Amino acid sequence: MIRKNQEFLNRVNILLDMALVILAYILASWIRLDFLDGASENMAAVNEKTVLLALAYSVVLFFFLSLMGFYNTTRTRRLSWKIRTIFLCVTLSILIASTLLFLFRLVEFSRGVLLIFYLATLIFLIGKYTFMRLVLSRFRGKGYNLKHVVIIGTGKLARQYREDIAAEPELGFHILGFIGNRNLLQNEDPWLGSFKEVENVLSSTDINEVVIALEPEEYNRLWAIIPACERNGVKYSVIPFYNDIIPNNPTIETIGKSKLISMRVNRLENLGWAILKRGFDFIASALGLIVLSPLLLIISICVKCSSPGPVLFKQTRVGYQRKEFQMLKFRSMKINSEQDTAWTTDEDPRRTKVGAFLRKTSLDELPQLINVLKGDMSLVGPRPELPHFVEQFKDTIPYYMVKHQVKPGMTGWAQVNGYRGDTSIEKRIELDLWYIDHWSVWLDIRILFETIFGGAVNKERL
């Protein structure tokens, strides 16, 4: 029943999206041609042809959203993912529409209508799904629109899943009960039976989904549990016993009958995304060096006058694929013998007065734009470390070397969250790994924005 209702609601949802797109076009045409200009002779004016074109556009947009899995029936998609997907697909489809207008030389078609249409479509669709999420969250919080789940397993993984579900009631999952060893459950946990009773329990029509959460020593039971789920037509998911070490986005490759789970894959291994990130880095660093050249000149003069020594400080760091490179900074200290084996500390006596200010404001990092332009670094990524510390941490900090699977950055997720300099290396690595697993263009833009507007000034004392 839920599946049939969900299919019907999905169709209604898609039709409503298409209607909102057509309404966005009608509104855009009215605003630009009637409200602002007071004339509607332009070929973008609302008529049968343009409404049909808006309908065709909505079909193309629906196609792109479908390719992204936007209309798949899953409750675990976050609102932020939906907003990013809408933005990406609407932008792509409007670029295609603009290209077609250019190719067919429809120069009289109002570009103002197209721009307002683009903005109105984003506002309508994002507003709709934000409103829907708020309404559903409230309904599910009151016990409506719930998906009833049976957990097979009573060990650590099963209890963790129960806690995760309890922490996010807006997802609308309701645990009917557990199958497994009753002695491992708390008194308030509903017990449905032992592993031997799986078949009888799954025959119930009240079950929407089964979550299999077995401990390593229980995995021999899978060969009985999964066929039981299949026979009863119940949708099931498996929480692997290596849940704590598996990344967020593993990939599965097949060689013959062997299925290989790639445990550490990042989106930047995709050539298209890598080219996009590198292209942005190259253009942004080149423009940055040009625009900031007067400031760079002033800082260079101040550094030169502050103490004897070179303007730029070159330091060997470990970068992409564990290769060493020379990272550039404005020199902020007097020449010393510990520059390759020690971190700078708050109120470090080696700092010059100019250097203290540069470090406080992160202006000493600006020459790394040259590293970005050369390709040694990226604007955003895990901060590169000294070889001395890499050798020290690789054996003591779990997953430390994973950070070298992407290019190091001038700023990063750890830095905008307050972990820079002499701070917890464990927490920094945790945040760096989160960045690698969750990388996206929008995440890079967010990190750059937070760095420019607040993240550049650190807690070091002058």
Image (cartoon, rainbow, N blue to C red):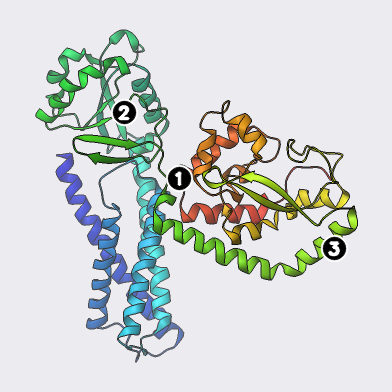
Q: Which residue is mark 2?
A: 239
Whole-angstrom CA distance, mark 3 to mark 1, is 41 Å
Name which of mark 3 and mark 2 comes first in the sequence: 2
Residue under numbered circle 3: 301
437 vs 387, nearest the viewer: 387
Residue at position x 34%, y 44% in the image:
136
Measure the C-alpha gap from mark 2 to mark 1.
Answer: 20 Å
Horizontal side of residue 340 vs 317, given as left or right = right
Mark sitting on residue 205: none
246 above or below 187?
below
Going from N to C along the chain, the mark reached first, 2 or 1, is: 2
- Residue 75 versus residue 248: which sits nearer the camera? 248
The residue nearer to you, when weighing 336 against 163, is 336
Camera sees residue 366: yes
- At label 1, counting other C-alpha atoms closer than 10 Å, the crowd grade (few under 14, some 14-19, many 20 or more) is some
Which one is in front, 364 or 99? 364
Drawn side of residue 195 relative to residue 319, left or right = left
On residue 438, the disc is 1
Disc 1 secondary structure class: loop
Helix, strand, or loop for circle 2? loop
The amino acid sitting under disc 3 is Ile
Considering the image in quadrants, where does the N terminus appear? Answer: top left
Q: Tell me the amino acid under the disc marked 1.
A: His
Looking at the rendering, which quadrant does residue 232 occupy? top left
User: What's the CA distance linking mark 3 and mark 2?
Assistant: 59 Å
> Residue 45: in sight, yes or no?
no
Residue 92, image x and y in percent? 36, 67
Image quarter in which the C terminus is found: top right
Task: Tell me the element at label 3.
Answer: helix
Q: Are marks 3 and 1 in contact (CB under 8 Å)?
A: no
Q: Residues within 10 Å of mark 2 (few under 14, many from 20)?
A: some
